[in-house]
Amino acid sequence: MDRISALRNVEDAIRAFEDGEADLADTERRVATVLRTYATEFDSEDRRAYRVVDGPGEGRVVVAGTPAEAREQAVLLADAGDAVDATDVTVEPL
C-alpha cells in the first residue's frame, strides 16, 4: 500500500465516523489496520520496516536502514519505564 492509498483509506474511515456509519472503536480499528498494512509493506531504497522484540510481546515496528539502526531506534523510543536491553532483542525485517 502506498502513502496516497493509505491516506485515502484513513480519510474514508474518518468520513464514515463523521457520517455516523462507524463508531470511534470501529474507526480506530480501521485506521490502525491501514497503518499496520502500510508499515508491513513499507520498503524504500535505503530504509525498511523492522519488528524489534525485547522479551514476550509484540515489540515495536520501526523504519530504519539496517537492523542495528532499528535496534537503536527501538531503544530510544522505549518509554522511560521500559527496560529495553539493546543487546537482548530480536530484529526481524517485516
Image: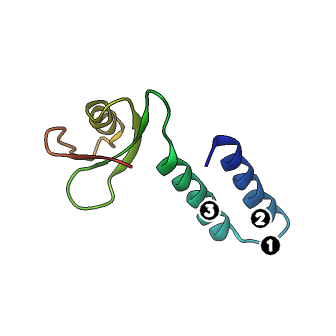
Residue on which disc 1 sits: 21
The circle on residue 28 is 3
Q: Do residues under tags 2 and 1 come within 8 Å of each other at their CB atoms?
A: yes
Q: Do residues under tags 3 and 2 come within 8 Å of each other at their CB atoms?
A: no
Q: Give me the residue at 71% from left, 71% from top.
A: 23
Residue on which disc 2 sits: 17
Q: Residue furthest front?
A: 45
- Going from N to C along the chain, the mark reached first, 3 or 1, is 1
On screen, residue 90 versus residue 11, left or right, reads left
Q: Position of residue 51 (x, y in %)?
A: 34, 48
Q: Position of residue 85 (x, y in %)?
A: 17, 41
Q: Position of residue 56 (x, y in %)?
A: 23, 61
Q: Amino acid at mark 2?
A: Phe
Q: Give me the residue at 62% from left, 62% from top.
A: 28
Per the model, the C-alpha gap separating discs 2 and 1 is: 6 Å
- Going from N to C along the chain, the mark reached first, 3 or 2, is 2
Count of numbered badges drawn on the protein: 3
Q: Give me the residue at 36% from left, 49% from top.
A: 60
Q: Amino acid at mark 1?
A: Glu
